[in-house]
Structure formats: structure tokens, C-alpha cells
Amino acid sequence: MVRFSNQLVAEAIQPFWAALQAGEFLTDAAALAGTHRWRGLKWVRQAGGVRPRRGRDLKGRCLSFAEREEIALGRAAGESMRQIARRLGRSPSTVSRELRRNACGAGDYRATTAHVRAYERASRPKPAKLATNRRLRAIVEDDLAKRYSPEQIAGRLRRQFPNELEMWVSPETIYQSLYVQSRGALKRELTRHLRTGRALRRPCRKADERKSRVLPDMINISQRPPEADDRAVPGHWEGDLLIGKANRTAIGTLVERSTGYAMLVSLPNGYKPEHVAPALAAKIQTLPETLRRSLTWDQGPEMRDWKQIRVDADIEVFFCDPHAPWQRGSNENTNGLLRQYFPKGTDFSTVTQAQLDAAGNELNDRPRKRFGFANPNEQLAELLLR
């Protein structure tokens, strides 16, 4: 018997796939389904990147998992079938049929068990053509090994066997057999012969369906004051995240351009925009006004609420061009040095702000060749006395 999981609940998983196909990012699509990014990624991997067909267009005829939970609660409370049906807006015969078909022994009814039974009963698996026709499968596998595309294979089959319909197959059938392993036809290893070589299928979207990663109303680095470029005036900062174990935790890093002075920001609750903005603003607010001139960041989604930082910390915020880490060279170099204290794989949820401050203090005490082996602490103190 199939075990219950969220993948059986169409009203939970189909909004996730619909959002992905509409161009949403994985994190946002998972949020729409009421789950987190890692669960969404697991769904994608298990499905081979192909949206499940079942449950796409539910018309309300089938009971949802939420309705089955209500039936279970009603039965436990001693309600009659008519009372339960009236509360759900369903026919009493629908509730009666559900209890007759999917109740456990002795009339016990559990929503998870009932949903699994209904799911299995509704399954009418049609054997895949490439699973039953061995001759056809052998030709397709051989052509894939020759690096033919599925479209080329399908077209070639029609040319070779114009009067044998059983030897015809569509490109989509080949893709489905490669990526949806439950169809039991082609091995996923054959995907390495495709032009992309991807083990997971990605949705094909039109240009106007692609969601832009550009942050709203962001100000490009080209508009940053020229004084920030020559590093003569203190108060211009570069920032980024230092990512931890399994990409689940992070800390914020801030580096002052003219002195190399570094500050580390704890993000114990994660690095979503709602976590990053208040933490950065609070850290920057600890600086004197003369050291709050500008902050330069990359176009990461964690800076969605950059306007909040600008207002709360009274600092101008600028963004680098895409894929241009050299525009934050000081910060990139500092992040590399910080890996001596926090190697890749560090779980930052266990690192306190006091530990971050200790690492920052030690880093700021290191002599730097570009300052004639003075350290950032000395450089900052000298600039503040001018």
C-alpha cells in the first residue's frame, strides 16, 4: 500500500507546480504550497522535473484531503452523515459512500488512510508504449546513444515505418519515459545523451513568462558617488552573505572600502528578506553618521527589502551588475579570509553574535600589505581623527 505523503494531496502540490510553470522561483512556489524550499526541491527531484498529471484540473467532484479530515473529525465527534454533509456542502450519499469505501476495520475512519485508498483506487495506469514495445524501445535507446534528440527520433521513426503505427512515438513520450521513472520505460541515465544532459527536466517558458530577478526600483552601482571608487572617504561599505551548511544558514558580512574594517551580522532565523533587512539595519545603526554613506550589495533576493534598510539605517544602497563580484572586491576577499574561521559547511545557526564579533575583531587586527602593514582598526581610527 502506498504511504501517505503531501505528494498525494493535489490541492497542496498542484499550486506548487503551477507556480513553477508560471515562472516563480522555487522558494516562492514552495511558499504558495505552504512548505519550504527544500521540500519543493525534493518534489521536483522525485518527479524528474515533470509536473504530475493527476489532480491538475479537479472540478470539485472528488473529495479533497481537507474534506476527509473534516469527515474524520465529524465521526469522532459523533455527528451523523447528514450533519457532516451539510457542513461540507456535500450530498449525504457522498459522505456515506466515502465511509463505506475507505473506512478501516470496525468502521474506524482516518483521513490519511482514506486518502491513500482513494488515490490507489483512482489509479488507472496505462502501460507506457516504450515499456511494452521492446523493439521500439531498443531503437529509441540506440538513437539516444547516438545523441539524436527526441524530436529527431520521432521524425525518423515515422519515416522508417510509415505504415506501422505501433512503431510511432511522440517526442513528449520519450521525454516522459526518460524523466518520469514510474513509467518504467527508459533509464534516466540516457538523459546524459541529450543536448542539455540534465537529469531533471526544466519547464519551457515563453520569454514574457520568465520572472525577472531584478529587485524593485534598485539603484545601480554606476550611480554611486565617485568618492566611493577612490576609497579616499570612509563610510562606503560592501556587503554579502556567507552561506553555511547545506545552504540553510548564513551570516551577513560588511566591509568598509577605505579601511577594510569588517563587521559580521548574525542571522539566526535564516536569510530571507524579512530576516536580512532588520538585522543589517540594526548593525549599521551602531555606526556614527560619518561612516554611513553607502552600502553596495549584489542582486540577491535577500535584499528585496533594501528600501527598509535605507530608511532605518539612513544609508544609500546600491547594487552591482549581475555576475560581477569584482565590483565588491573587498567583500569577496574578506569572505575568503572568514573561511579560516567558518569553513564551508559551518552551521551558522549555532554561531552566536559574540563569536562573530570575536572573529571580526581578530580579522580587523590583522596587518594588511596595502596599508603598509597597518591593520583596519588603526586605519579606521586614523580616518575618524581627521
Image (cartoon, rainbow, N blue to C red):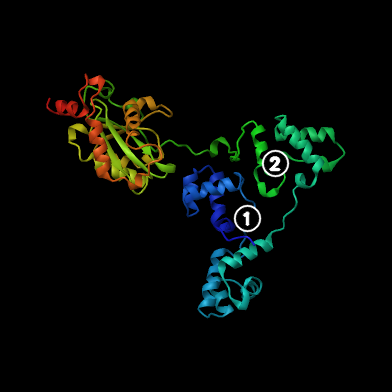
- Residue 165: x, y in percent? 84, 42
Q: Residue at x 63, y 60 (%)?
A: 2
For the question of whether residue 259 can be seen, the reply is: yes
Task: Tell me if residue 49 comes above or below residue 319 in the rendering.
Answer: below
- Counting residues from the start of the chain, the first of labels 2 and 1 encountered is 1
Residue 139 position in % (x across, y down): 78, 36
Frontmost residue, 283 versus 316: 283
Name the image quarter holding the C terminus. Answer: top left
The spot of residue 116 in percent (x, y) is 61, 63
Residue type at the position of mark 2: Glu
Q: From this viewpoint, is residue 168 visible?
A: no
Left or right placement of residue 242 versus residue 358 in this view: right
Task: Check residue 57 in the rendering and tell me which mark sits there, or answer none.
Answer: 1
Residue at label 2?
172
Dot 1 amino acid type: Asp
Q: Is residue 82 left or right of residue 235?
A: right
